[in-house]
Image (spheres, helix red, strand yellow):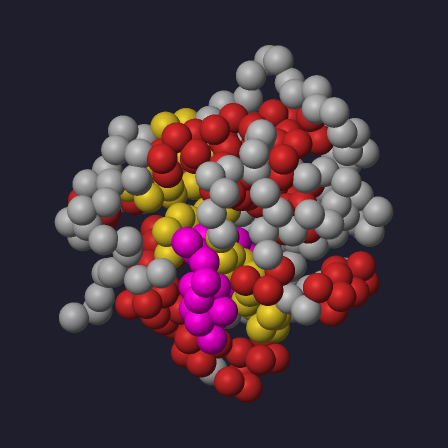
Amino acid sequence: MDKSQLISLIKVPFGYGAGRMGSELGPERLLRWGLIEQWKELGYVLDEPSRILLKDQWSDKAVSVPLKNASKVLSICTALASEVKLKRDEGHFPFILGGDHSIAMGSLAGLTADGGSLGVIWMDAHSDLNTEETTPSRNMHGIPLAVGLGRAALRLSHIYDGAADIDPSKTVLIAARELDPGEKELIKELGIHCYTMHEIDKLGIQKVIDEAVDITSSGTDGVHLSFDIDSIDPTEAPGTGTPVQGGLSYRESHFAMELLYEAGIITSCDFVEVNPRLDRNNRTSKLAVDLIGSLFGKRIL
Ligand SMILES: NC(=[NH2+])NCCC[C@H](N)C(=O)O
Ligand SMILES: [Mn+2]
Ligand SMILES: [Mn+2]
């Protein structure tokens, strides 16, 4: 992200894709902790923020998805995809603030609709690679990456006309530590680069990010960062619906963001799964704002 590019903040106060409600309160809470002021202090110019809301008229797509709240998720994702596409066509940096992680299907659909090839960095305790067949929870926030890769009955092209599957060889998972059986199989079958916490312990976060940057930026037209706050350890980020112990430390998560800023490859971002209802003293919301600062070039000195 360079400072001549406008940031388009797209707020998506939507939590129906998660097992517990509350992430729909994320966008307003992060704004309350100074997200916009921070961007301005860093020298960025913001477009008028937009907000994607659920309409009464829910989507009735040609595909049946037997998961919880599927029609609401499809509807919000289609609306989000068209907003993301619009902002991207204007040359802006789409920053999608959720909400639960199901909305990433809308981001990916909008970002791939121009036919370019997209690298994806998915930072998450989970891989979100379940399908309607493998999901143990039937929650839609467990499937968005499988949908993005064209591995579920629901495809990005059902969400938005012209959207295309993303390439598994240009997709990287970081911070995974809770994978369901079907997800493990899919990772192996597709050969997805998966840096679990084991690889992070072994190689260090710097090497992991360096490799992720190479994999996702070579031969692509852009790199989308899909950041699930549950990638961070719950001691630092307790306010999220599906916390898993053994996650990224405070400094690892900041360092990862700082390195991504230095690499200069990120062209769009989702920031999801902050659940203010489950938070303690706003710790998670404040951390989220700080991490976004690091991603956009905030330095200690
Ligand atoms: N975006 C998330 N936090 N996803 C959690 C998914 C958890 C579990 N794998 C499921 O399918 O339900
Ligand atoms: Mn996720
Ligand atoms: Mn997760």
Q: Left or right: where does residue 79 sit relative to residue 182?
A: left
Q: Is residue 42 above or below residue 201?
A: above
Q: Is residue 150 above or below residue 253?
A: above
Total marks shown come to 0
Find the residue positioned furthest to the bottom: 202
Find the residue positioned furthest to the right: 133
Q: Left or right: where does residue 121 sit relative to residue 180?
A: left
- Residue 198 among magenta residues: no
Magenta stretch: give its range: 211-232
Closer to the camera in the image, 175 or 34: 175
- Residue 214 among magenta residues: yes
| Residue 95 in sight in this render | yes
Q: Position of residue 173 (x, y in %)?
A: 57, 64
- Residue for point 59% across, 64% down: 169
Q: Position of residue 129 (x, y in %)?
A: 69, 54
Q: Is residue 291 above or below residue 23?
A: below
- Residue for point 66% across, 32% down: 158
- Residue for point 71% across, 31% down: 70
Q: Is residue 233 above or below residue 287?
A: below
- Residue for point 52% across, 26% down: 79
Closer to the camera in the image, 282 or 242: 242
Q: Position of residue 243 (x, y in %)?
A: 61, 57
Q: Position of residue 122 (x, y in %)?
A: 54, 58
Where residue 194 sits, quadrant-wise, is bottom right
| Residue 18 in sight in this render | no
Which quadrant does the C terminus fall into?
bottom left
Closer to the camera in the image, 239 or 228: 228
